[in-house]
Amino acid sequence: MKKLLLAAAVSSFVAGSASAATIYEKDGFTYKLNGDFQVQLRQDPGADQNAEIEFDDLELKNYVSYDVGNDMKAFGRVDFGFKDAAEDKQDGSSLEEAYVGLQYGVASFSFGKQNFASDEFGVEEIYEDLVGEDQFDNVATDGDDTLRVDVELEQVYIVASYEMDAEGEASENGEYFDLFVSTEIAGLALAAAYQNATPSIGAEDFDTYGVSASYDFNIATLAADYSVTDETSTTAEQTLLNVAATFDVASTTGVAIGMQNYELDDGSDDVTGWYANVTYKFPAAKNVSVFAELSDTDEDESDMGYLAGMRVKF
């Protein structure tokens, strides 16, 4: 689940989450390790679906950094995901991110296998999405030949990324340019994102745009985002709307409800989905949680989906 909170924005030079375990730190060198283990009993919404055990996610994230002087830091990150291996999908790579970079003050530059700037976009609070998190997610949000710049100012977070076309190389997967900007003032968070995509060499390029807003009312947070992918000579315009509300029913328990609407502008029916979930965090260990979710869509013959699971992270 994504959360549009500037304070929680994770740029490529941040040393993992606040809960990362510092394995070693001495003489300007730091090694941190994150883990995120989530297992679900899940039946997806739709026709003739069966319940099964799903893994989302099983990740280990390694972060290293060196203080190289003059307010500059060199860093590197290698993340491994074991979801596909757990589900016996042996053709999937376990390497999810692998990049290096330099941080100077509030800015960083990184390059390698990593997420695009547009991956920061979105307000949905669903555990398992129904029609895609947003239109950027439905196009592409990561690459193997990605250059990325992050700038984290006091009130504004800016990210730009460029996925090289790498023509003729084994890592060739198209060319993408992405921008993301967010700000937060007195509980109001605003964001905008843009992507120009050329999925393969010589293919027609197209644009995706998105805007989002959320407001913290103290007792609840309301949020919405809207993203649209332009039509091409072969594909109609696509739009995706998210509306979500979150609130705490206790210091340990949070509830989220939301709606998603996906529309393909070719005369076909749009798809509307809804979801509701509850998450309980153990008071003695907030990185351990259990959760449950119900979801459904208005597609014909669609049965309600459900899931229940547990998450352990550090």
Image (tube, rainbow, N blue to C red):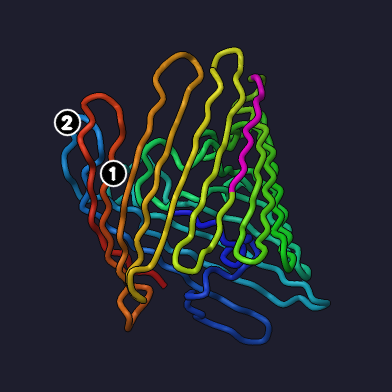
Between 263 and 132, the residue placed more toward the observer is: 263
Residue at 55% over, 39% down: 226
> Is residue 59 among what the camera can see?
yes
**Whether residue 156 is situated above or below residue 52 in the rendered picture:** below
Residue at 38% over, 29% down: 271
Residue sticking out furthest to the right: 70
Residue at 20% over, 52% down: 41
x, y percent for residue 24: 54, 82
Residue at 65% over, 19% down: 204
**Whether residue 115 is situated above or below residue 35 in the rendered picture:** above
Please name which of the two marks, 1 or 2, marks the residue nearer to the observer. 1
**Whether residue 177 is situated above or below residue 71 in the rendered picture:** above
Q: Which residue is mark 2?
A: 48
> Is residue 166 among what the camera can see?
no
Our reading of the magenta stretch's main secondary structure is: strand
The secondary structure type at the circle numbered 1 is strand
Pointer 1 local density, CA inside 10 Å: few below 14, some 14–19, many at least 20: many
The range drawn in magenta is: 204-212
x, y percent for residue 267: 45, 14
Between 51 and 301, the residue placed more toward the observer is: 301
The question of residue 209 being in magenta is answered with: yes
Disc with the residue nearer the chain's start (1 vs 2): 2
Q: Which residue is mark 1?
A: 295
